[in-house]
Image (spheres, rainbow, N blue to C red):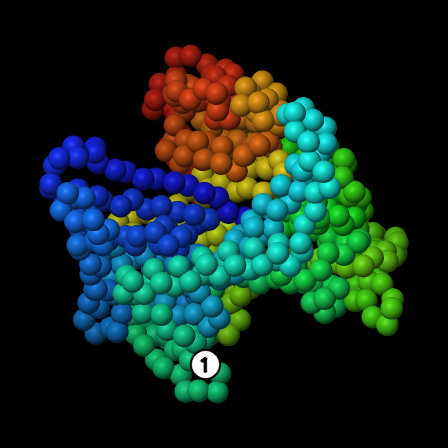
Amino acid sequence: MQASLSLSLSLPPAAPRSDPAPTVFRPSALRFCGLRREALGLRPLRPAGSTWVFPSPARTPSRKTVAAVSGNGSPSKGFDYDLVIIGAGVGGHGAALHAVEKGLKTAIIEGDIVGGTCVNRGCVPSKALLAVSGRMRELQNEHHLKALGLQVSSPGYDRQGVADHANNLASKIRNNLTNSLKALGVDILTGVGTIAGTQKVKYGKVGFPDTEITAKDIIIATGSVPFVPNGIEVDGKTVFTSDHALKLEWVPEWIAIVGSGYIGLEFSDVYSALGSEVTFVEALDQLMPGFDPEIGKLAQRVLINPRKIDYHTGVFAKKITPAKDGKPVLIELIDAKTKEPKDTLEVDAALIATGRAPFTKGLGLENINIVTQRGFVPVNERMQVIDASGNLIPHLYCIGDANGKMMLAHAASAQGISVVEQIGGRDNVLNHLSIPAACFTHPEISMVGMTEPQAREKAQQEGFEVSVAKTSFKANTKALAENEGEGLAKLIYRPDTGEILGVHILGMHAADLIHEASNAIALGTRVQDIKFAVHAHPTLSEVLDELFKSAKVNTGVSPSSVNEPVTV
């Protein structure tokens, strides 16, 4: 479900209208939800060293480009391809496009449909549903509308229309993504891919002979599937996973959501906005256990308590039985610690949001002595696969959910690009602490780096101090203009060096605001330097501006004493 958006576009200075010379444009790597610009139907990228040429309007009114996309390179001697990628999700797509830019002859194998979980069953359709829930909340909030001088009567929704919006968006992005691969000359090989041996891959459809191909390098990018604990019977109708929920085939009056992480929290936002009563079932003692504790408490006050949402914490759903023969869904709860029976819930539906499991079965990993760890493919910091003896397997990499380092679509894409850089002889180690995450509730939650407890634990181990700075959205002009002053930004940093350890935000457009902090961590920018950055007024970005300015860093710190960007 999770994703982030980063946008980078570099244009040359505009030429005078009377200048008949063509304008030269070097396209930047635009990314949406970890996707490249081509997935949005924008112009595909050219390989490195080439340019787009646009005819001047004075010469012709046509928008057709003069230059055409070049071919997919020539493979290394003795191989069918320079690079073969198993899995055409966001990670595989990002790796494939970057490989073509670097002149590698590339193929991508996909046994299902292009786009993987993010495009078809995750980031993309969920954001469509959340867009609807956000608007419904605003229209239903009479106090909020009255404060803005607005009057709206009887807001409602068409369930099928909402479902179609999500499905159509996924279909559009999927088609654009597929076309972008084809336009760049990436060979899309349909079938289930398996590792046949060193630098060998087989692929094929069930019931048909497999085709074997060779590649100088191979990337495993097979993603993940919803994890369903033992004792839970999924029928896809009354007991279902996020894969089924995104179809929005019905809106139950009362739904239990098992798990209060990113997925569960986002679906609670959707269902409660559409009129459902929601009950969380959480195994740990507090809701939203993956969040910074202070942000989690505020999120509970803002996103849970005012809504028709209740919860049971410290309990397992030992058994869940789908509704049938006129009986409701039955959920048997037991104490998470003692395993003693606690309660039985009777609800209309149950959404299983207990996380995701790597999709690595049937990959043929045993053919090259790989033993997975809870299903995850073991890798080092460069995504190189490690065999059962602890040795690196040459020319084999694994990215994204399948390796378990960080199960986010944009992290998979970043890992794929890092691998391609290494294949090209440019050492590249991704700093996972600089990768942001976001939960697209209303208001949104975002984070990058360490939580406060994680930072303090590290400080105790390494012998340094930790400081915390905070700022409220209530002090931001733009947030107040929108009547959206509920929110908090939190900075965790080292006062001796100014190193940014973590940033956490709950508030309007938090998912967009986090990138200034994530880029600062990636580049090793210190608090005492970033506080001189200028932010447009009045904008929400000033929340971060005030946050950095409020941090107190010891003076007289030399640049050499500041930690360089960390690789994790």
Relative depth, front residue between 147 and 24: 147
User: Residue under circle 1?
Assistant: 205
Q: Is residue 472 among the parts visible in the rendering?
A: no
Residue 296 is situated, as x and y percent measured from the top left of the image, at: 67, 36
Relative depth, front residue between 564 and 19: 19
Q: Taking 229 as reference, is 100 left or right?
A: left
Residue 444 is situated, as x and y percent measured from the top left of the image, at: 59, 37
At 42% from the left edge and 22% from the top edge, which residue is drawn? Answer: 535
How many other residues sit within 10 Å of disc 1, few (<14), some (14-19) or many (≥20)?
few
At 40% from the left edge and 83% from the top edge, which residue is drawn? Answer: 210
Would you identify the image quadrant in which residue 300 lies?
Answer: top right
How many numbered marks are there?
Answer: 1
At 43% from the left edge and 76% from the top edge, which residue is drawn? Answer: 191
Q: Is residue 198 shown above or below 411?
A: below
Would you identify the image quadrant in which residue 354 lies?
Answer: bottom right
Q: Is residue 401 shown above or below 548?
A: below
Q: Amino acid at mark 1?
A: Lys
At 54% from the left edge and 27% from the top edge, which residue is drawn? Answer: 492
Q: Taking 239 as reference, is 72 left or right?
A: left
